[in-house]
Each structure stands twice: as C-alpha cells, then as structure tokens.
Image (cartoon, helix red, strand yellow):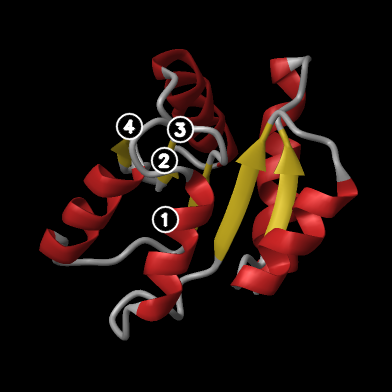
Amino acid sequence: MIVDDDADDRLYFSNAVKEIDASYECIKAWGGDQALKLLHKAEQLPDFIFIDINMPLMNGLDCLEKLKEDEKLKSIPVIIYSTSQYQKNSDYTRELGASYFITKPIDIKKLPQLIITAMEKSN
C-alpha cells in the first residue's frame, strides 16, 4: 500500500512495484484517513505500507501512530516514504513504530531498488 497525497507519486510508486514483480498489487490511498478506511474494509491486508510524512488532514506520523495502535493493523511493516533526508525524522519514525525510512529519489529509476531494500530490511 502507498499512502501519499501526490497523485504523481502514487503512480510512480505503483509503477515501480509492478516493475519489481508484475503480480504485486499496490493499494493506493491519498491520505491517512482514507488508508485506515481501506484497511478496515480490506479482505486481505497488505504486506507493507509506505506512508508519506507530509500530507494534509492526517499526516504520515499520525497515520503511523493509528496503525500501530490498531490490533488488526499493528503487525504490518510500515515504511516512511518522504522527501526529507533528516536523520532526526528517520529516528523519530522508528520510535513511533516504523520499520524503515526511505527518501524519495530524484531519479525515479532508483525507486524500485529503494522499495526492494525497504521490504528486505522491514522483515
């Protein structure tokens, strides 16, 4: 699952996931509220959730906290996906329960490898 308010970033992300493995499905949510609603209705939960930090209404940190408080959802690895490169953000998201932190690449061709690395390090 990708949770990001930017439609282009959601598209790039889902395309990168398909590039990794065409059989993978990527659930897309435009914000934390929508992600939580989709997850509570889902018949099958995602293996990983990638969340952008900076979103309106419910930001990525608030969404992460809600996920980790929910008995049904708390075991899903959450990777914070952000333009920020600050180590302090990475450390803080881990304190909140994130499994990994990746910085959105400038070169979109690097995104599939970043996703693979995040999934490997989150298991």
Q: Measure how far apart labels 1 and 3 are at the Cα level.
A: 10 Å
Mark 3, residues whose alpha carbon is within 10 Å: few (<14), some, or many (≥20)? Answer: some
| Residue that label 3 marks | 55
> In this rendering, which labeled residue sits more in front, label 4 or label 1?
1
Q: Secondary structure at mark 4?
A: loop
| Residue that label 2 marks | 3
Earlier in the chain: of badge 2 and badge 3, it is 2
Q: Quadrant of residue 5?
A: top left
Front one among 71 and 23: 71
Residue 109 x %, y %: 72, 19
Residue 54 seen from this side:
yes
Q: Secondary structure at mark 3?
A: loop
Q: Residue at x 32, y 78 (%)?
A: 70
Q: In the rendered structure, are the residues bearing label 2 and label 3 in contact, judged by CB atoms less than 8 Å apart? A: yes
Residue 29 x %, y %: 31, 38
Earlier in the chain: of badge 1 and badge 3, it is 3
Q: In the rendered structure, are the residues bearing label 1 and label 2 in contact, judged by CB atoms less than 8 Å apart? A: yes
